[in-house]
């Protein structure tokens, strides 16, 4: 009798990034990544794959220092993390819509094995979620102001402002 493992392939869900910057994500990208992971975790009867938790993937990436545009990304994740397949995705927004695309990639060849997309209605809340954390901080920070005055110590020992026409000795 042949004994088989319940799962044959390891799948990892990578970051969902803005279409114009594949190296960063936003709270929206993290939410999409979590939702894709949740859907894959609810695997159909007979599915033969296991999921690698996203924090483990990030740890592998950090330990291997493979952030950014690393041409050996797939090899490193496959060899170090044991991944057979990866789900990678992107999103792009207009004023009215957000398009999200997900691709199932073979970790050996980076070939796209399957692809799916969805178009969502965009609004203020969704737009806020798509901003990068540093963009949000910049936009919410009050403007920096500086007030300066030229002062002198008067004969009475008090500070006085220099005004037009003042005589200093």
Image (spheres, rainbow, N blue to C red):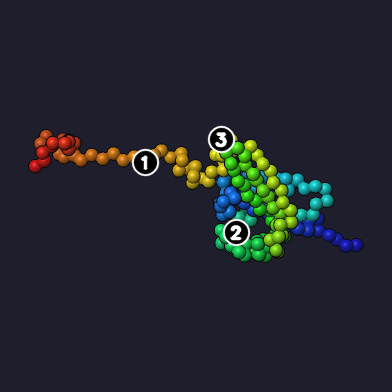
CA neighbours of label 2 inside 10 A, class few (<14), some (14 to 19), many (20+): some
- Please state if 66 lies on the left or on the right of 155 as rendered: right
| Quarter of the image with the C terminus in it | top left
Q: Residue at x 16, y 36 (%)?
A: 164
Q: Which mark is residue 124?
A: 3
Q: Position of residue 83 (x, y in %)?
A: 70, 59
Residue 112 position, x and y percent, is: 71, 57
Point 65% across, 51% down: residue: 89
In this picture, is 25 found above or below 70?
Answer: above
- Label 3: how many Cα within 10 Å (few below 14, some 14–19, many 20+): few
When asked about the image quadrant of residue 86, the answer is bottom right
Q: Quadrant of the N terminus?
A: bottom right
> Which residue shows up at 68% across the image and 50% down it?
102
* SS for dot 1: loop
The quarter of the picture where residue 64 lies is bottom right
Closer-to-camera residue (36/81): 36
When the figure is inspected, residue 97 is found, relative to residue 90, above or below; the finding is above
Choose the circle earlier in sequence order: 3 or 2. 2
Q: Which mark is residue 144?
A: 1
- Disc 2 secondary structure class: helix
Q: Secondary structure at mark 3?
A: helix
């Amino acid at each position: 009798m042949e004994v088989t493992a319940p799962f044959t392939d390891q799948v990892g869900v990578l970051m969902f990034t803005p279409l114009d910057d594949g190296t960063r994500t936003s709270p929206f990208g993290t939410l999409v990544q979590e939702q894709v992971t949740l859907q894959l975790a609810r695997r159909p009867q007979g599915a033969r794959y296991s999921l690698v938790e996203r924090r483990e993937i990030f740890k592998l990436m950090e330990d291997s220092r493979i952030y950014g545009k690393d041409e050996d990304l797939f090899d490193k994740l496959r060899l170090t993390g044991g991944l057979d397949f990866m789900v990678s995705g992107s999103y792009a927004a207009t004023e009215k819509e957000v398009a999200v695309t997900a691709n199932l990639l073979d970790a050996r060849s980076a070939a796209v094995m399957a692809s799916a997309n969805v178009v969502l209605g965009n609004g203020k809340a969704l737009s806020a979620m798509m901003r990068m954390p540093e963009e949000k901080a910049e936009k919410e920070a009050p403007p920096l102001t500086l007030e300066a005055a030229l002062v002198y110590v008067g004969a009475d020992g008090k500070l006085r402002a220099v005004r037009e026409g003042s005589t200093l000795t």
